Amino acid sequence: MQTASDLLVDCLEAEGVETVFGVPGEEIEDLLFSLRGSSIEFVPTRHEQGAAFMADVCGRLTGDAGVCLSTLGPGATNLITGVADAHLDKSPVVAITGQGNRERLHKESHQALDVVDVFEPIVEWNTQIGEPEIVPESVRKAFKLAEYEKPGATHLEFPEDVAGEEIDAAPIPTRDRVRRPDPDDESVERAATLLEAADRPIVLAGNGAVRTRAADSIRAIVDRLGIPVVATYMGKGAISDRDPASLMTLDSGADGEAARAVDRADCVVAIGYDIAEHDPEGWNPDLEKTIVHVDHEPAEVYRHYNPDVEIVADVGATVAAIDERVPSDACSLWCADLHDSLLEAATTGPDRDAPISVRNVLPLLREAMADEDVLVSDVGDHKMAIAQSFPTYEPNTCVISNGLASMGIAVPGALAADLATDANVVAATGDGGFLMNAAEIETATRLDCGFTIVVFDDDDYGLISQKQVDHRDEHFGTGLTNPDFVTFAESFGIEARRPETWDEVERAFAEAVPSDDLTLIDIRLEE
């Protein structure tokens, strides 16, 4: 007879789970030993937040729910930032937390919190597994809802007394994921008519354009019609930034040239657009644009985003259906000159006497990376530069947190990306975000991961300083002091360097990025 914890692990195996990230705890002892006897690798991390970020990025890159595990109380609350990131960034994650014996939960008790209630606002669904008999249904539902479009996080609480109970049951077999239907003809015809009637149409590619694997359909319609495309930060790579139709992201260019192009557009085809990423008031302030909404869910009710047509259906199939209805001469690449200037600015290396800044460094980093290599960006001033000025050529190769926009994701996220892909991986982070989860370097060395950590080092929470200066002409409360990052990295037994000239920066990237070694490059920014 198996225990409930054995059954839960059997259910995880049935869902195809290969890795669980987490921090061990007393209340999950049974579950840990059940994992030991399974095909699933349990990866002990240095912090639960790191475990949740790893699950988040695994889910984002693979489309299969990443799994993170913690004990009760502080372990569960430490997961919250990464779980909330998955929630707002629409990444499939299943979080599992331990809990004490049920007989003590009705009263004040050591480390006991109502974790299910705490998680309620930041997950698609969560429950306590209060009886062994409900393990199969609970696990199946958690994965189904986490992976169902739009995806997100779900949570299971597993009390320790339930985990040890005996049960004779089996996992519920998985089935093909629920697929949205093809679009209805009437809506497609209305969308095609609006697109054909527009003088300056544009595609706004959001997170869902990449997440739903609709890039091929988007590239096909763009190639045939010659319609320009601008992306949100999480939509980067929906089309290649080498494509003449690409205007990179909404904020790209000097003084937001791409945003000015969107200002000129009279029809916006929003594909997989997520308001949590980018407020539509910024690109539709006067409520004058015709909007076609293509997504798996109806549009949020918002004064500045009130689509003329909403097509709630499979995204790729919808784009292909619109493509079939619009004559090839209906659109034009009405801002091709802007693409050339944007790409040139983003790929031209710095003058040798230029200061070492994030924007000046990025062309050299891009040159060292293959098209399919993955960059995981932390949050900070460097994220803005990466989002706006780092050309992206393939979907899911520039991972940016822009829903919750949480600092600390880069190092654990790059570890997950290294496990999930065969490509070379770069973690780009500021000194603030880096030290939030830098301990996961030890986890990476234990797993024999090989990726490159680029730390942009300015002794400051630079993005907040800049915003304060913009608002008040001064900044306060943002200054930092840092360890010697090279010595710090070397203490983990990994390669580290601090290039001080442009030739050294270029050489450091060229050697580190394609290698199989775990390397840290400390880029000391100049004023």
Image: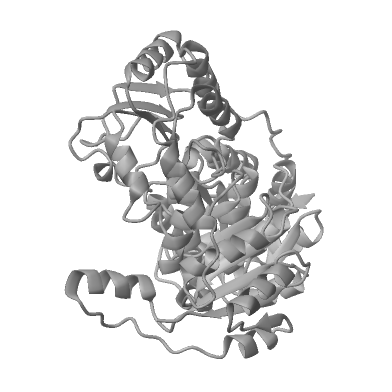
The answer to whether 363 is drawn above or below residue 186 in the figure is below
Q: Which quadrant of the figure has residue 448?
A: bottom right
What is the x, y in percent for residue 277? 38, 48
Count of number-bearing discs: 0
Residue at position x 51%, y 48% from top? 154
Q: Is any part of residue 82 visible from this angle? A: yes
Q: Nearer the viewer, residue 173 or 388?
A: 388
Q: Nearer the viewer, residue 212 or 470?
A: 470
What is the x, y in percent for residue 309? 33, 20
Position of 253 with respect to 226 (left or right) is left
The answer to whether 516 is drawn above or below residue 177 in the figure is below
What is the x, y in percent for residue 153? 51, 48
Q: Nearer the viewer, residue 152 or 405?
A: 405
Position of 449 with respect to 190 (left or right) is right
Q: Which quadrant of the figure has residue 506?
A: bottom right
Residue at position x 43%, y 84% from top? 459
What is the x, y in percent for residue 169? 72, 40
Residue at position x 63%, y 86% from top? 486
Q: Which quadrant of the figure has residue 266?
A: top left
Residue at position x 54%, y 20% from top? 320
